[in-house]
């Protein structure tokens, strides 16, 4: 599982999002880690209790048949098994964290790229909105300065072009385009 996780995390540095097959493999690996953790965590408790039960003094009265059957020599073995279970549970937690951060790191470049595209689309929408506003106002046939004269149309074009160029320069300066 460690090798599979390492292979998966190395593919993140290819500067491209994970392929669908890699995403599926990562999901399956994470499910397998969860299943392994569900097995190891209770085993750690059980073997720890068995090790403690084997360490109880023989002359201490007990009604638990497990205490009677366990001898002192098995305490070390159960403690060893408990240690292995604890180590495995901690390892699965670590691998699960690595996989979670791998998913986050895989999504981060895609999010940045999407945000960049959204900024550009928003900037162009704002630039296109200015001529739409001016032509919409002129198209309503309401009196405006120089209404009905050629100078009025020229003035509308000058206002429209100045507003678009100003907006373009401001947006470009803020690095949205």
Image (tube, helix red, strand yellow):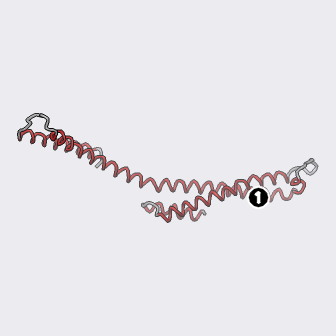
Within the image, what quadrant is residue 3 found in?
A: bottom right
User: Where is residue 116 shown, x and y percent of the image?
Assistant: 35, 51
Which residue is at a point 94% across and 49% down the rendered structure image? 59
In the picture as drawn, the residue positioned furthest to the right comes out as 59
User: Where is residue 53 shown, x and y percent of the image?
Assistant: 84, 52
| Residue 154 appears left or right of 82 | left
| Residue 99 appears left or right of 61 | left
Compare residues 155 and 77 and report the one nearer the observer. Answer: 155
| Residue 59 appears left or right of 24 | right
Disc count in the image? 1
Compare residues 40 and 58 and report the one nearer the observer. Answer: 40
Which residue is at a point 15% across and 41% down the rendered structure image? 139
Task: Tell me: residue 162, above or below residue 10.
Answer: above
Compare residues 31 and 5 and report the one nearer the observer. Answer: 31
User: Where is residue 121 shown, x and y percent of the image?
Assistant: 30, 49
| Residue 116 appears left or right of 66 | left
In the picture as drawn, the residue positioned furthest to the front comes out as 141
Which residue is at a point 52% across and 62% down the rendered structure image? 24
Which residue is at a point 25% across and 42% down the rendered structure image? 170
Which quadrant does the N terminus fall into? Answer: bottom right
Within the image, what quadrant is residue 145 found in?
A: top left
Bin the neighbour count of mark 1 within 10 Å (Cα to Cα): few under 14, some 14-19, many 20 and up: some
SS category of the residue bearing label 1: helix
- The residue identified by callout 1 is 80
Task: Tell me: residue 123, above or below residue 70.
Answer: above
User: Where is residue 6 shown, x and y percent of the image?
Assistant: 55, 62
């Amino acid at each position: 599982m460690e090798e599979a996780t390492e292979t998966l995390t190395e593919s993140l540095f290819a500067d491209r999002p994970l392929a669908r097959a890699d995403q599926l493999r990562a999901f399956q690996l994470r499910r397998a880690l969860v299943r392994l953790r569900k097995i190891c965590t209770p085993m750690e408790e059980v073997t720890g209790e068995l090790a403690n039960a084997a360490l109880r003094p023989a002359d201490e009265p007990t009604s638990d048949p497990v205490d009677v059957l366990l001898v002192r020599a098995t305490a070390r073995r159960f403690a060893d098994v408990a240690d292995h279970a604890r180590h495995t549970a901690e390892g699965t937690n670590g691998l699960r964290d690595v996989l979670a951060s791998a998913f986050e790191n895989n999504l981060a470049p895609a999010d940045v790229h999407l945000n960049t595209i959204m900024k550009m689309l928003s900037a162009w929408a704002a630039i296109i909105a200015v001529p739409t506003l001016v032509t919409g106002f002129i198209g309503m046939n309401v009196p405006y300065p120089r209404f009905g004269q050629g100078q009025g149309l020229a003035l509308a074009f000058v206002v429209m072009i100045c507003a678009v160029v100003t907006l373009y320069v401001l947006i470009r300066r803020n690095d949205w385009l």
